[in-house]
Image: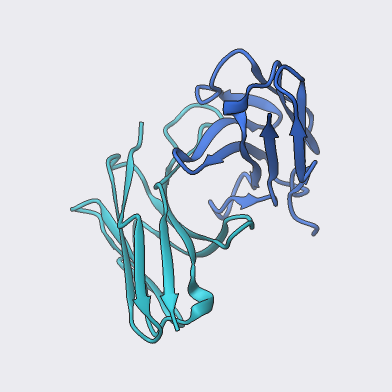
Amino acid sequence: DAGVIQSPRHEVTEMGQEVTLRCKPISGHDYLFWYRQTMMRGLELLIYFNNNVPIDDSGMPEDRFSAKMPNASFSTLKIQPSEPRDSAVYFCASRPEGGSDTIYFGEGSWLTVV
Amino acid sequence: GENVEQHPSTLSVQEGDSAVIKCTYSDSASNYFPWYKQELGKRPQLIIDIRSNVGEKKDQRIAVTLNKTAKHFSLHITETQPEDSAVYFCAASTNPGGAGSYQLTFGKGTKLSVIP
């Protein structure tokens, strides 16, 4: 399996622009997570889905952030409008329904908002 | 919700020495405790995990211990090597109930430096 696939790997954008991050989970995994990593706050869970349904979005910082999972193999995290404080690494991760509780991370999307 | 505290935030050891990283958790319902290693610019990757029905688990030079009563767990790395230098994260997970519910809470991480 190719693992969790994220795009873009790196993005530099101007403040006020819309940013869309994409994720393809591991095939057969029923859970999908979006995390944000910064030096100050570490790894923060933003939102997670189970069977394409958002279960907990309490970590989404504000209305500028939104996430969707239209099908089992694709999810997006959108920031509109972006701000410099959104600069971070955004990780997508997935996990199967049963069996191991392990979650598997993608390579991350490195976002810089200038 | 769950709260995971991790110490120390930075750790430097001489090559060949042992390193110990400690974590505490708050939710007694937590039942799965993974450890992730993140090298610079890379993704976090699972290195070892332990479930609440086990007190200790070992895999070559790394081991994890769990004390459910005290709600703390530790990572032990013996005979450290320069390639062990990375940020290590502990985490605790539980299924709090409700359809599809799952929680995995991470500690803030420990930056381990192994000095040759």
Q: Is residue B75 above or below residue A7?
A: below
Colour pattern of the rendering: by chain
Q: Position of residue A30 (x, y in %)?
A: 68, 40
**Taking B42 as reference, is B47 left or right?**
left
Q: Position of residue A35 (x, y in %)?
A: 58, 38
Q: Is residue A75 above or below residue B45?
A: above
Give the farthest residue toward the front.
A114
Q: Is residue A55 above or below residue A31?
A: above
Task: Say which chain is blue.
Answer: A
Residue in view at x 64 percent, y 47 percent: A96
Give the farthest residue toward the left.
B70
**Quarter assignment of residue B21:** bottom left
**Quarter assignment of residue A56:** top right
**Taking B80 as reference, is A63 left or right?**
right
Q: Position of residue A85 (x, y in %)?
A: 57, 27
Residue in view at x 63 percent, y 55 percent: B43
Q: Position of residue B5 (x, y in %)?
A: 31, 46
> In the picture, which quadrant includes the N terminus of chain A?
bottom right
> In the picture, which quadrant includes the C terminus of chain A?
top right
Count of marks placed on residues: 0
Q: Is residue B92 above or below residue A14?
A: below
Please identify which colour was used for chain B in the image. cyan
**Taking A79 as reference, is B7 left or right?**
left
Residue in view at x 76 percent, y 43 percent: A10
